[in-house]
Amino acid sequence: MNRMQQNVDSTQAIAESDAIAVERTLAGDRDAYRVLVERHSHNVFRLAYRMTGNRHDAEEVVQEAFLRGYQKLGQFAARSNFGTWVYRIAANYAIDRMRQRQKEDARREAPRTQDQDGMEDDPLNRVKDEAPTPERLTQSIELRKQMEQALAALSEAERTAFVMRHWEGCGIEEIAAVLKSSSNATKNTVFRAVQKLRLALQPVVQTRAQARAMGTES
Amino acid sequence: MKHMTEEELIAYREGIAEQRLPISEHLAACKECRAELERIEAVLAALDTLPVPDPGADYGRQVWKEIAPRLAEKPGRWWQAWLEPRRLAAAGAVVALIVGAFVAGRVTNRSNPGDNTASKEQVRERILVVAVGEHLGHSERMLVELSNAAPNDPKQREVNISAEQRRAEDLLQENRLYRQTALQEGDAGLASVLDELERVLLDVAHSPDQVTPAQLEAIQKKIEARGILFKVRVVNKELQQRQEASEPAPAKNDSKKGERNKV
């Protein structure tokens, strides 16, 4: 049996086991829901973290997704895959949380932008990295910061579309359902996200690649 | 030779291109487009190095522990969850807010027909201020009690904080609703403090019923480190000042009108 077949079989076995757990939960066995929570928490956390960009919000999203999933489980009965379903609930809640967080951050950041030379807003972050520092570690931290900033600069829809497509490998229809958008518009959102990320990060990535080629960085 | 657009290359890379074959064929023959695709891939490959923290092997169990007390006996009927006493209390608070704002808005409307929008907003804000002030007062009392809790006997192995825990659960529901209302009303400062308070309430609500003196001390240190009691007091004080400032002063020649505007 090849590896791909094994994966398909394992996915089917999980889906069947999920379906049984859903039925038992709906019949009043609350502990059956525990199986679903324990099985899917890691995946939902990964999605939530990539969408929200911080652990606190990601954990809130995971809990809320499973709570909402439990409350709406009656609506799930006709569907086939619990993992995909709870994933969608999590993505929707993550979008709401991102919106709230943006408003809260905008309020907190306001005084900070006036103090542009302060510690919080490092001016180095705004300088294009044309002459990279020799320390690899510093560079990696800097690149990571820039990537996080580039992701944070995407709109909620762009970030959702990018995370779900690029990192989570979700289908366009599934992403379109979360974004309440058409397939074509969703594809366009994925494109815009990658284009913006490229615009923000390509100069840094290229500089690092050149430095590696010249031997100034391994 | 007509080159591929950036959109076509990104769609190809992300597996969402309508027709892959013509793009593959073009890439095989076109060095420039291959180089362009490599540049896109380099950015995506860099992004793939961003780490996701590992929540731990027993994360699923932790999530279950957090949510289990909040699940209704049977799922699927969403309205049942709203019949839980604590949800009813929170929903009641919000209904009171809305009804209060509506009634007060009507009263203010009649007395000041020329300044509808401003007065309605003032009344709505005043009601939010009063309700949130009470909520912050309750939260402060619970946190003070928890901060001062100590074992009765030095040999005591566990301290019962179930009362504080239950109150934190109730306050958590209210807090979420008030935070969302504050955001909708555009009061980002208040929403921000409520967000911080929510994290502390979450910690307390998810603590065990019985804690060891060391665990209790850890909770107390956490509360202290976040400075949440101080922030709650400051915001509550500000709210009181806003409440006093927004209360209409009695008019010199029309005392009845002043009385009517008072909420």
Image (cartoon, grey):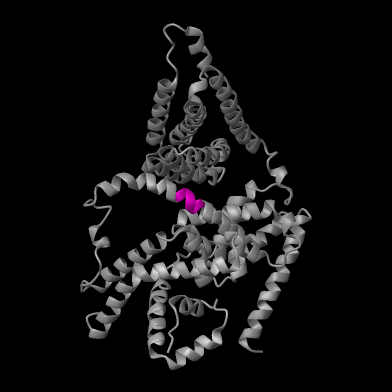
Instruction: Classify B88 as above or below A19.
Output: above
Total numbered badges shown on the rendered structure: 0
Spot occupied by residue B239 in the image (x, y as percentages of width and height): 42, 28
Position of residue B127 in the picture relative to residue A151 (left or right): right
Residue farthest to the bottom, as pictured: B29
Q: Name the magenta segment's main secondary structure.
A: helix
Q: Nearest the camera: B150 or A201?
A: A201
For residue B61, say whether it is visible: no
Q: Is residue A135 left or right of residue B190?
A: left
Query: Residue B65 or B262: which is nearer the viewer?
Result: B262
Q: Measured along the vertical axis of the image, is residue A192 above or below residue B177?
A: below
Q: What x and y, as percent, mark residue B221?
A: 39, 43
Q: In the shown orientation, is residue B69 left or right of residue B210?
A: right
Residue A130 vertical position relative to residue B225 in the rendered view, above or below: below
User: Is B261 displayed left or right of A124 in the figure?
Assistant: right
Residues drawn in magenta = A97-101
